[in-house]
Image (tube, grey):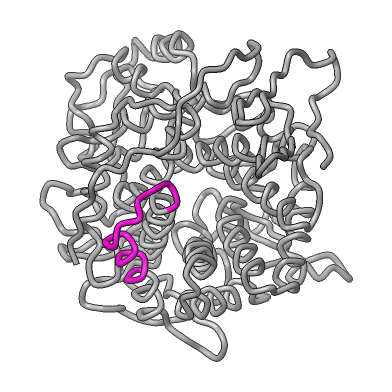
Amino acid sequence: MSIDTVRQPLSGEHCTANAPDTLDLSARAALAVNALGGSIDPKLMTMFGQIVLCTSKPYFSHWASADTLLDPKFGESFPLMRLMCGSEQYVELEAKYRDAMMSRVQDGLYWDFYSADRPWRNSYAPAFYGEGRNEDFCTLPGTARMLRALLVWRELGDNSSQTEEAIRSLVAGLRRIAVCRDDYCYYPEKGGWGEPCSYPRSGWLNTDEAKGETEGGEGSVICMHGHQIYGAAHWYAESGDPVALDLAARLTSYCMLPRFWGGVADPAGDRTGLPGHVAPAMPDPPFTAGHEQGHWFSHFHARAIALRGILEYAHVAGDQHAAEFVRRSWEFTLSQGIARMGWINCYPGALNAVEGCALGDLVGLGIRLSDYGLGDYWDDVDGIVRNQLVEQQLTQPELLEGIVQQFANEPEPGKNAHPGQLDFGESASAVVARAIGSYGGIGMPTSVPRPSVMHCCTSNATQGLYAAWEGTLREAGDSATINLLLNRAGRLVEIGQYSIRPGRPARGCRR
């Protein structure tokens, strides 16, 4: 099925409001639009997966099949950022970009088509999955991210029959190719080649079931299933589609299996077969049932993808056990870092850093747990937003230019050092200008070491900006609820944050 889209302008009215010179998430969204549009390859109409800054010649680079896998994340972020700030920068490019993504929806899946113009495709982790092949394939997380993007487009005004048809076809396709066992279903980690959970056009190469969480090149099995749960649960809430509910329920049962949770990072353990960002594990301490409480020891962003999906399923299905599992996991997560600063160690015993992707997850998860009555986590969200989410965004060109200058005397890499590299005809200043609004890949509590950009982080963290902005002020009828003390103009209320008492963090309002 090939679907052409028509540009759908956001409905509503623009407004202008004066705001104090304090943190303004709308301004950060405008910078994000610059980064999203500036990182699209107009020739191939796919994103550049990375920006390399710590080199004598900074450049954009394609990144395996992460490009097409992550395109829908950009597709989801673009309209959310525009809703926040009203920017129309790159609006025509975005329309073409949407068309390109929609053209990949066929037979109920979102495909990465073979093309000789993209020699870097299906090469994310060949040591784990084997060398790529010249055949169309889809990554199941990419299909689920496309489902999520379509749901956002629909919510923001694209009510065309084509959009609904695409949503239904993706839900049905994801259910059709899932491998079912008992009351759960899954996607084989090594079902294809080059990438985790990749489905070749010719069908699964094998249907082996994962024995543990850290298998494969990403070091996480359940992260390859979480977006499917999230999208299917949302579509069920919108449509009542029984296929969507069945898919979300079965994948949730799989992701909550005890084999995927519990354990404690063991930095001195045997690292055989693990990617560099994952430490081995030792068993839980005595009398600690970590698998029942969502305890994790590795790659929090990957765990959060599943947790966010499980929470949405729990909400629409009224599954109190699943909801409590996510709540307990959130409470445990806050203990894995410096909660007051909003910093979580996403890779215990390995990188010991917070990933930009995870910041969006933390904000989204904390807000949804609060919305669904499972706790009051607005203060935690406030700390994450102020101390990590906005601080990991690259906003100052002079600082990035200074970083580039530190590498001025290093030899230039060859023009073909990376097959997906942007032509070196672009100047360093042009690369920096297009990078403004992006997110650093990893962060320490008070710094972004050796900044480089993985655009999975840009797209996920910007969605954290939206979640915080939307959650700050909720208006319905003639009532308003303020959850965060951040600048925000609304229909009934305008919030202006004028100052913070020295030595004390800003705190969210209790509802």
Residue toward you, 277 or 504? 504
Queried whether the magenta region covers residue 167, the answer comes back as: yes
| Whether residue 267 is visible | yes
Q: Residue at x 30, y 78 (%)?
A: 205
Residue toward you, 269 or 155? 155
Looking at this rendering, what residue extends furthest in the front direction?
A: 478
Residue toward you, 62 or 439? 439
Instruction: Using residue 37 as the reference point, say whether residue 501 is left or right of it.
Output: right
- Residue 19 picture location, percent across and down: 62, 14
Q: Residue at x 45, y 24 (%)?
A: 30
| Magenta region, main secondary structure | helix
Instruction: Using residue 111 as the reference point, say whether residue 484 is left or right of it.
Output: right
Q: Quadrant of residue 436?
A: top left
- Residue 424 picture location, percent across and down: 20, 22
Quadrant where the N terminus sits is bottom left
| Whether residue 215 is visible | no
Number of labels in the image equals: 0
Q: Residue at x 36, y 18 (%)?
A: 432
Queried whether the magenta region covers residue 166, the answer comes back as: yes
Stretch in magenta:
155-170
- Residue 159 picture location, percent across and down: 35, 55
Q: Quadrant of residue 308?
A: bottom right
- Residue 162 picture location, percent across and down: 26, 61
Looking at this rendering, what residue extends furthest in the left direction?
A: 116
Q: Residue at x 64, y 73 (%)?
A: 256
Residue toward you, 102 or 177? 102
